[in-house]
Image (tube, grey):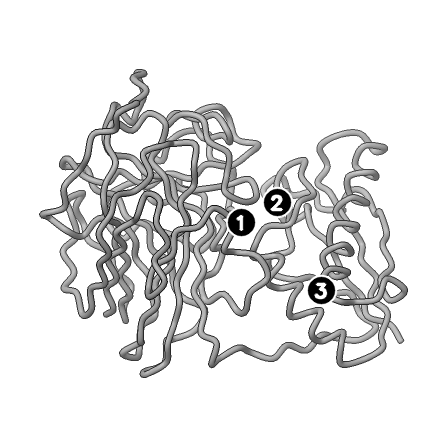
Amino acid sequence: MKYLSFLLPPATVLLVVFLFIQFPLFGQQGYNLIPNGSFEQNRFLPQQWTTSDGKMGLKYWYSPSMGTPDYFTRGSLLDAGVPSNFAGVSYAKEGDSYAGLLFGNGNYEYLAVPLKEVLKKGEQYTIKFSIKPAQYSKFTTDSIDVVFTSERTKIPHWKQLHLEPVMTLKVEGTIAYSPYIWLEVEGSFEATGNEKFLVVGNFNSSRKLLKREHYVSKPSVVGGQPYFLLDNFYLSSAAHEPSYHYPSDSVFSLQHVYFGFDQYKLNSDAKEELYFLSEYLKSNNQILIISGYTDAAGTIQYNKRLSGRRAISVKNQLLQLGIAETRLKTRAMGVYNSKNEQKKAVDRHVAFRLVN
């Protein structure tokens, strides 16, 4: 397994392994090996804090212990919504969703996810993500840990996980004290091979927790404990990016080009997939028909407009990626004909068709 310990600087730029910057790191990049890295895909909308692993709602991600990390997204009820929820008030770094973890003082939660591909021995990889303390968190910390394992971790207790590090990267500093500023961190490492899963949380039993100077005291599930919000995970290797092929003259959709409730903005995972679609379009002269859809909530007229905005968002992203406007046609389709209440998130998508 691979172990990275990120110690997060408050206001410095670290040029070798870690980077603290004030603008998004997660725009148009290469292939993200972490599925659902921006937490926009869900199995269902959470209605409160997580009470068991099976009720977290996130697609692909899971709890590797008996701890109960939380999932927040716009469209959920107050306790699990965005921007307001039981941990305070916070907008997502990008999109409509983020996750939350208890980080110490006897309470430890972890998030884990299977990677899209097994990491290759000797290749250099870069991992990036955003973090900040929740508004109602009494504490901050000087580091956060990432572990890569070859097997799915599932420990039947709520205590701290102790995974032996293979490599530790440290930079002196402390995480931003403000709950209103997302801090982006970046680390690079060489894979030992056979890494298949990522686990994030606090694995260091000697880690010190620091009291925040401007702690917001309010009764909540957080209860003043160290609680952190996470968003926009990204793992890539410049040496290995897959090639994509798309069917001609038939309708297809992309795995991550879906939208939050009543939203038409693209998240980082969607932009990544559109990057590869744009590269494919540059290799031919086909026309791309972009059809936007919504779920059944709302009026016919409103859904028609919203579906059109979703199609236009995709078109605008492809224009930024260098595709000529004459090759992009949009259609506002309105409601997607799914009668399954559990598939509303799938209904909020854009479909594609390549024609000569």
Q: Quick check: 262 above or below 17?
A: above
For the point 67% across and 39% down, the residue is 263
| Label 3 secondary element | loop
The reply to whether callout 2 and callout 1 are in contact (CB within 8 Å) is yes
Q: Are marks 2 and 3 in contact (CB under 8 Å)?
A: no
Q: Which residue is mark 3?
A: 321
- Quadrant of the snapshot with the N terminus: bottom left
In this picture, is 71 found above or below 15? above
Could you tell me the amino acid type at mark 1?
Gln
> Could you say where residue 33 lies in the image, as x and y percent from the top left?
46, 67
Q: Residue at x 50, y 42 (%)?
A: 93
Q: Which residue is identified by label 1?
A: 41
Q: Residue furthest bottom?
A: 122
- Spatial CA distance of label 1 from label 3 is 24 Å
Residue 20: x, y in percent? 39, 51
Q: Say which residue appears at 76% left-offset and 54% top-offset.
A: 316
Q: Which badge, 1 or 3, is on the more N-terminal residue?
A: 1
Q: CA distance from mark 2 to mark 1?
A: 8 Å
- The amino acid at mark 2 is Ala
Q: Residue at x 69, y 69 (%)?
A: 277
**Left or right of 127: which side holds 318?**
right
N-terminal of the pair, mark 2 or mark 1, is 1
On the rendered image, what quadrant is the C terminus found in? Answer: bottom right
Q: Where 141 falls versus 172 (above or below)?
A: above
2 vs 1, front mark: 1
Residue at mark 2: 345
